[in-house]
C-alpha cells in the first residue's frame, strides 16, 4: 500500500488507535504476554513516525485502560515498567521528530515512577509542534464522562452555570480530551470489533477501521491502508449524499 496514494489535503487531523493483540501475538510464538507488549513498542514507534511524516496533527494511543488494572498483577507491573522505560527511552526521539507528548486518564492511579517519567517527558516536549502523541493511560471514556458530569454538577451547585447552559460545548470543554479535535479515524487491531470504553463521546462521527493485524505486526503500510480506506468513505454527518454534493 503506497503512501503516494494518500491525499495530503484530506488527512484525518486526529487518529485514535486501540492497540490490541499483543497477548495473542506472544502466545502464537510460545512466549509470555509481556513479550507481546515489548514488541508492541516497535509498532508505537512506526505509527508515531508515520503519522508525523504524513502531517497528522494528533495521535491518541490506548495504552492502558481503567479495566486493565484488573489483569494479573504481574502483567500490570510489567506493563508499567515497560511504559516507564519506553517513555524515558523515547523522549530524545520525540524531540528529534518534533513530537509533543500528552496523556489522558487518571494519572493519580499510576505508580509514582511512571507518573514522574510521564510528566517529565510532557514537560520536555511541550514546545514541539509537529504532532501531539497522546497516551491514554488509566483511561476509560466512562471515567472521563463521570468526572465531567461531576464537574458540571458542581458548577451548577455553585451557581456558576444554569441548567440551560449544559450543552455539547460545555461537556466537550470539561472532558480531559478538550485540547484536541475529535478523532476522524479510529483504528482497532487484532480483529476484535469493539470500542472497549475508548473515547465514546469523541467518536460520535468518527470513521471506524478494523484490521486483523495484531498490534506488534502493525507497520506504516497498515497505517497508510487505514488512511486510504478513510479517504474512500463519504462522511455525511447525518446529511444526504446530494446535500454534500
Ligand atoms: C492490548 O493487547 C495492549 C495493551 C493492553 C497494552 C499496550 C501497550 C503497549 C503496546 C506497550 C507500550 C506502549 C506505549 C504507548 C509506550 P492485549 O494484551 O489485550 O492482547 P490480547 O487481546 O491478544 O490478549
Image (tube, helix red, strand yellow):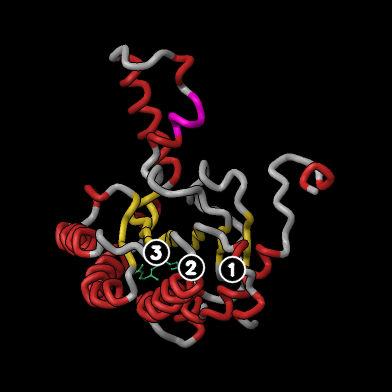
Quadrant of the snapshot with the N terminus: bottom right
Residue indicated by mark 1? 8
Q: Is residue 169 magenta?
A: yes
Mark 2 or mark 1: which comes first in sequence?
1
**Figure quarter occupied by ligand 1:** bottom left
Lateral position of residue 208 relative to residue 91, left or right? right
Q: Which residue is mark 3?
A: 131
Which region of the structure is painted magenta? 167-171
- Above or below, 157 against 97 in this view is above
- Measuring 44% from the left and 41% from the top, which residue is drawn there? 142
Q: Is residue 231 above or below residue 182?
A: below
The residue sitting at 41% across, 84% down in the picture is 31
User: Mark 1 and mark 3: span between their CA atoms?
Assistant: 15 Å
Q: Is mark 3 within 8 Å of ligand 1?
A: no
Q: Secondary structure at mark 2?
A: loop
Mark 2 near mark 1, Cβ–Cβ under 8 Å?
A: yes
Mark 3, secondary structure of its residue: strand
**Residue tagged by mark 2?**
55
Q: In terms of depth relative to the viewer, which is nearer, 80 or 3?
A: 3
Residue 38 on image: x %, y %? 35, 79
The one of 195 and 24 positioned closer to us in this rendering: 195
Graded by Cα atoms within 10 Å as few (under 14), some (14 to 19) or many (20 or more), the crowding at tag 2 reads: some
Question: What percent of the width, then of the height, locates residue 166?
Answer: 46, 22
Residue closest to the far bottom: 29
Amino acid at each position: 500500500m503506497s503512501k503516494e496514494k494518500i491525499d495530503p489535503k484530506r488527512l484525518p487531523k486526529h487518529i485514535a488507535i486501540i492497540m490490541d493483540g499483543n497477548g495473542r501475538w506472544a502466545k502464537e510464538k510460545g512466549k509470555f504476554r509481556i513479550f507481546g507488549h515489548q514488541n508492541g513498542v516497535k509498532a508505537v514507534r512506526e505509527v508515531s513516525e508515520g503519522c508525523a511524516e504524513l502531517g497528522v496533527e494528533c495521535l491518541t494511543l490506548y495504552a492502558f485502560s481503567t479495566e486493565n488494572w484488573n489483569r494479573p498483577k504481574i502483567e500490570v507491573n510489567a506493563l508499567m515498567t515497560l511504559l516507564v522505560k519506553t517513555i524515558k527511552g523515547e523522549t530524545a526521539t520525540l524531540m528529534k521528530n518534533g513530537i509533543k507528548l500528552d496523556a489522558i486518564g487518571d494519572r493519580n492511579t499510576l505508580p509514582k515512577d511512571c507518573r514522574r517519567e510521564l510528566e517529565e517527558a510532557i514537560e520536555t516536549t511541550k514546545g514541539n509542534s509537529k504532532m501531539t502523541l497522546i497516551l491514554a493511560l488509566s483511561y476509560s471514556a466512562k471515567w472521563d464522562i463521570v468526572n465531567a458530569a461531576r464537574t458540571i454538577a458542581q458548577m451548577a451547585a455553585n451557581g456558576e452555570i444554569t441548567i440551560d447552559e449544559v450543552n455539547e460545548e460545555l461537556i466537550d470543554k470539561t472532558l480531559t480530551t478538550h485540547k484536541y479535535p475529535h478523532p476522524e479515524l479510529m483504528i482497532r487491531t487484532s480483529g476484535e470489533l469493539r470500542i472497549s470504553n475508548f473515547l465514546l463521546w469523541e467518536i460520535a462521527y468518527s470513521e471506524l477501521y478494523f484490521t486483523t493485524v495484531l498490534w506488534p505486526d502493525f507497520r506504516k503500510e497498515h497505517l497508510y491502508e487505514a488512511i486510504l480506506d478513510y479517504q474512500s468513505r463519504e462522511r455525511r454527518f447525518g446529511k444526504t449524499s446530494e446535500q454534500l454534493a
